[in-house]
Amino acid sequence: MTDVIEKTPAGQVDKADNEALNLLKDATRHGLIDPAGADQIEAPYMFGQLTTEGLRARVPDLLRAGPAAGKALDAIAPAFAPGDVIELRALNPAGGGGAFRCGRLDNPAERAALESFIGQHNGRWNVYVGINPRRPDMAGTDQKASAQDVVARRVVVLDLDRKDAKAADPDWTRTVAAVKAKLDPLLVVDSGNGVHVWLPVEAVSGPDVAASAAPLAAAMERLGADNMTDAPRIARLPWTVNLPNAAKRERGAVARVAAPLPDFTPKPHVLRSRPLSADRLSGELKDIAVRLGLPGRGNALSAASPSRVASDGGEKTPHPAPSADVLRLALDEAPNAPGGPFDAREAWVDMGHAIKGASIAGGIEAEGREAFVQWSRQWGGDPDEPGRVWDGISHPHTGWGTVMRTLEALNPAGADRVKHAAAQAAFAQAAATNHAAIVGNGLEPFDGFDPKAYSPRPFLYGTSVIAGFITVLAAPGGQGKTSVLLADILAMCSGRNLIGEAPVRPLAVLYHSAEDDRAEAGRRIAGAMKHHGIAAADLGGRLFVTSGRGKAARRIKLARMGAKGPEEVPGAVDAVVDLATSGKVDAIAFDPLAAMHDLPENDNAAMNFLLDLLRQIADRTGAAVILSHHTSKAAAQDMDAAGAGAVRGASAVVDGSRVTRTLVRMTPKEAARFGVSEEQRRAFLRIEDAKVNLSPAGSARWVRIVGVPLDNGAGYWPKGDFVGVAESWTPPTAQSGTGADLARVQAALTASPRPPRADQRSPEWIGWMVARVMGLDTGGASMPKEDRTPDQAAALARVRAIVAGWVQSGGLVERQELDADTRKKHRFVFAGQPAVVLDADAAVSPPDTDGADDDE
């Protein structure tokens, strides 16, 4: 971790000139520059044939041609999860410039763009990476992230700057060794100014990202490290060049490659222990500081008023001032007189940065300048100096948060007054907006008394899907939601009735499969079309499919938790509306709902917010919105009893829908009644109308999930794939046999040399005789239960019901008698009260087997 020291070449005695050659050698030693290419420019430089500026200009080109960009992304990859969006920033060390690029490491096209960005700027500007993942919709953009754009925290980076090292550990060697031994770092980098240690932390998202900052910041202060806890924090990208700014050059810093320590090898993922929570990690870091005798850093004022530029190029995102009046009040409450906390010029300038950052972010830069100048003149001195300082601040990286933290440290009571004023201002603005929206044009008498003046409700598909409204299909995990949903969608697009409901006309449907890639969604759709005999021409180009996974992924997230609660992911609703309107779709299906947001599902306020966004989509497109959703684990144990309450999460999901359907698996009792084996029972589902607001609740419909072969076997997979497909199923009815059926069974009993048994387990059971006489295929007494087809099982269930009905009516009689063959008593069945045969019975009965004329 020491600077590179080389002999000064002939004719090149200036240290600044020698820096370019040292950087060339540093990058070559790390394998970032091809040695042959380095030799081609080093020799001319050594003999004075290449100027220092020429050498400086050539080094970035050699870096771009080498592996630096790929190695940089590989180095940080363990800190991110699949699908995470990372942000790269390139900042001009001289100030006044910046470039940004966002993308996913596991997306080849986006990774290539990230590598190109690194190659373009490495050695010219400083390149940084956001240590926390950004919003999914920022992938592929050149946006700069703010705190609201951060979706999670999974790592913590310790920035151990050499200028801050204390006597107890002058080069941070002991601290780094202790952290490596105890906390399993993901990455340890010599940044050129110090050491960066990347540590895993238990993942948090939403408001927990900001909440986790306080304990981590306290631990970093106790170690003596810079505060790296703000959500959009950036850190130097490994394998890129650290170009010092003017202040660092004054301290003797030179251009260096920021490289991972050669003596550090991270553990494989499978050998890592579970990441610690933010609180536990903070405690471990504090323990290390105590054991090593580190003195920590900072005092109350410096902690409250951090530097406007974090060490090593990190930035803080300015938060806006609530208003010019509130900003002026804050400065009135901040003491600024000789002998006060702003006597030190650095503290005063830092406050100026925060005020200007808050003013620019709040759109009140002119008012902010005036307030800063007036506040500064209280101290005295040159009256023009405040204006010069303000105008010289080009990139403030702190804002309203720093102003308030400073005020809280100096004048807590004043800070409370400012907070109260800010809340009042926000309330007054919101009140005015709401008042105008509610009052509108005043009141008008209601005149809508003619029922014919209202158009019929726009039912699109049976009574389940309604234009402009939300329908929820809920079931426990793995119980066929997607299979049923796809059958519904194919019915809508084809204009057919596939599982019990039909569309009013062939409909256009946008299906978003959030958890399956396009290939898997395609398999399931193709299997359902094969089973139901639907050709592509039947769909007429009315089915649109998008996916949230894979190469062609469209990761649609509608809402997330922000610093102040639920918030819309910028642009998401507009994008869905544009997609739907461009395809002129009648229905939009999101499968599943849980993948469409990052909100707490048990929070009614959060779910109300999400349902409001979905209603906006329905209102703006006129389309029906269909959501597949999970039920709670408790409800899954008894779906019949749970009803609409089975839907997982807050009740707002059910309350915000117009139709809620649930899938209920066939119960063992129902299976016994319908003659369905226990092995087959799980494939049968009832579609229940758990909640219907705009139509009468219909009777339950039954579907069966069947495995359909795709016949796509090839190579290592000769059998190919099977997919689950929903088909309509009608339970066997339990009607009794006719009078004619009973008469024939009674005749068979009279003619039988031996009465049949009442016990269904016996091969001589009366039911086998009934089935034979009535021509019902039950598979027979010798067929094992598991070998019966569903139709045979249904026929057997009908026979049981017929026998029970005839025994109850007296047409058959059970008596316990001695079996002459076995000398044991059994219950036998005999003919009872003679059957009464009506003309209607004869009309529906099978013909007699003896061929007699019915008219005789």
Image (tube, rainbow, N blue to C red):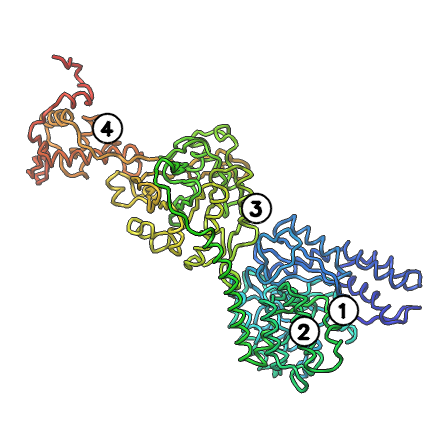
Residue at image mark 2: 372
Sequence-first tag of 1 and 2: 1
In terms of secondary structure, where does tag 1 sit? loop
| Residue 166 % position (x, y) | 67, 82
Mark 2 crowdedness (10 Å alpha carbons): few <14, some 14-19, many ≥20: many
Decide which of 59, 425 is in the foreground and name it.
Answer: 425
Residue 615 visible here: yes
> Left or right: where does residue 726 sit relative to residue 810?
right
Q: In this view, does 775 lie to the left or right of 324?
A: left
**Discs 1/4, front:** 1
In 3D space, how far apart are the residues under numbered discs 1 and 2 (Cα atoms)? 30 Å
Residue 244 shows which numbered tag? 1
Label 4: how many Cα within 10 Å (few below 14, some 14–19, many 20+): some
Q: What residue type is labelled 3?
A: Ala
Circle nearer the viewer, 4 or 2: 2
* Secondary structure of residue under mark 4: loop
Image location of residue 376, percent across then percent down: 69, 78
Q: Disc 2 on helix, strand or loop? A: helix
**Alpha-carbon distance for marks 2 and 3?**
49 Å
Q: Distance between the residues labelled 1 and 4?
A: 91 Å
Q: Earlier in the sequence, mark 3 or mark 1?
A: 1
The amino acid on which the numbered mark 4 sits, given as a three-letter code, is Leu
Report the amino acid beneath label 2. Answer: Phe
* C-beta proximity under 8 Å, tags 4 and 2: no
